[in-house]
Image (spheres, rainbow, N blue to C red):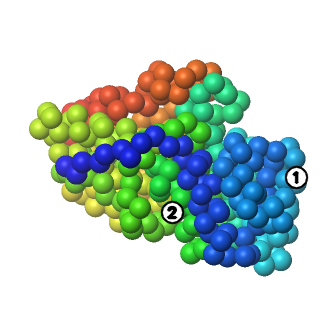
Amino acid sequence: MAQYVTKGFVATRQGFGEGVLEAARRNKRILGIGADITGSVGMDLFAAEYPERFISLGIAEQNCVGAVAGLALSGKIPVFATYGVFSALRTTDFIRISICYNNLHALIGGAHAGISVGPDGATHQALEDIAVMRALPNMTVVSPCDATQTRIATIACLNRFSGPVYLRFGRAPVPDFTSENQHFEIGKAQILSRGSDATIIATGHMVWEALEAANTLNQDGLKIRVINMHTIKPLDHDAVLKAAMETGAIVTAEEHQVTGGLGSAVAEFITQNHPVPMEFVGMKDRFGESGEPEKLMEKYGLSASNIAMHVKKVLKRKY
């Protein structure tokens, strides 16, 4: 299988901030909306270079979405970012009616997503945001795997796309391993490792864990396909169907509730087109807690070893 080497540990929120700034340098229509946590979500880079194009509305997330809608209707390309529990969940009704109903081009950043927020605890760990956002008509949902891909995805969402986008990213430093020259296309998954025994479809921070799991399984003689599903909506049906037909078993891995997230999206398609055994790695209908990110990932079964265990489990059902 292909070998991926980390270039270091970088938070995906840094990639988001760099992406917004780079996109804004190319496009004067891009404006930023903040909610008093500008540095925490990476928007401080943009605010420092373009203070005249950045507005902080304070801790009033619903008002921020209203401003985003107004700016988009006026021909601007607004970016609004705060913690995912606030940008996706506290504002759902406003996003649904003001942004999605009008199919406006706006980027909503969901920071501090997943259990790896760590010490902030259950109230700030966005674990239901994918489910909510992918249920909204017209909404595109993007979940990049590392800082480099987050930067590239952010630029693509702003300058090569139209319509509402929810882009999910995290707080803790994670392995940064993808190429600066990667081909990134919204709605087209990336095959990171080829194999015929089973497929791991992962998103966000879990992609690195999936690669680690595949490497471990490779030592046991198993050839595991790893797919980076960086876009959850629209789902890459071709990649999923091919994986089901060619490997006959699928494990999904996400830093999110197993209900309504990546696993549900894959299962919805698979059951109607080419049913195969599936296993789901993610949060099992529970809230998180405060703790160090790596310890929480291990406790809640979001580690490479747990993914490998689920692959072995699904293989028993395959044969």
Amino acid on which the number 2 mark rests in the picture: Ile
113 displayed left or right of 252: right
- Of callouts 2 and 1, the N-terminal one: 1
- The residue shown at (69%, 42%) is 40
Asked if residue 243 is positioned above or below residue 22 in the image, the reply reads above
Picture coordinates of residue 148 (x, y %)? 47, 55
Nearer-the-camera pick, 26 or 186: 26
Q: Residues within 10 Å of mark 2 (few under 14, many from 20)?
A: many
- The residue shown at (55%, 53%) is 15
Q: Is residue 270 visible?
A: no
Q: Residues within 10 Å of mark 1 (few under 14, many from 20)?
A: some
- Pointer 1 residue: 57
209 displayed left or right of 264: left
247 displayed left or right of 40: left
Q: CA distance from mark 2 to mark 1?
A: 27 Å
Asked if residue 276 is positioned above or below residue 97 in the image, the reply reads above
Amino acid on which the number 1 mark rests in the picture: Leu
Picture coordinates of residue 300 (x, y %)? 48, 25
Asked which secondary structure carries label 2, the reply is helix
- The residue shown at (34%, 53%) is 227
Farthest residue, direction left: 221
Asked if residue 20 is positioned above or below residue 128 in the image, the reply reads below
Picture coordinates of residue 7 (x, y %)? 38, 46
- Pointer 2 residue: 152
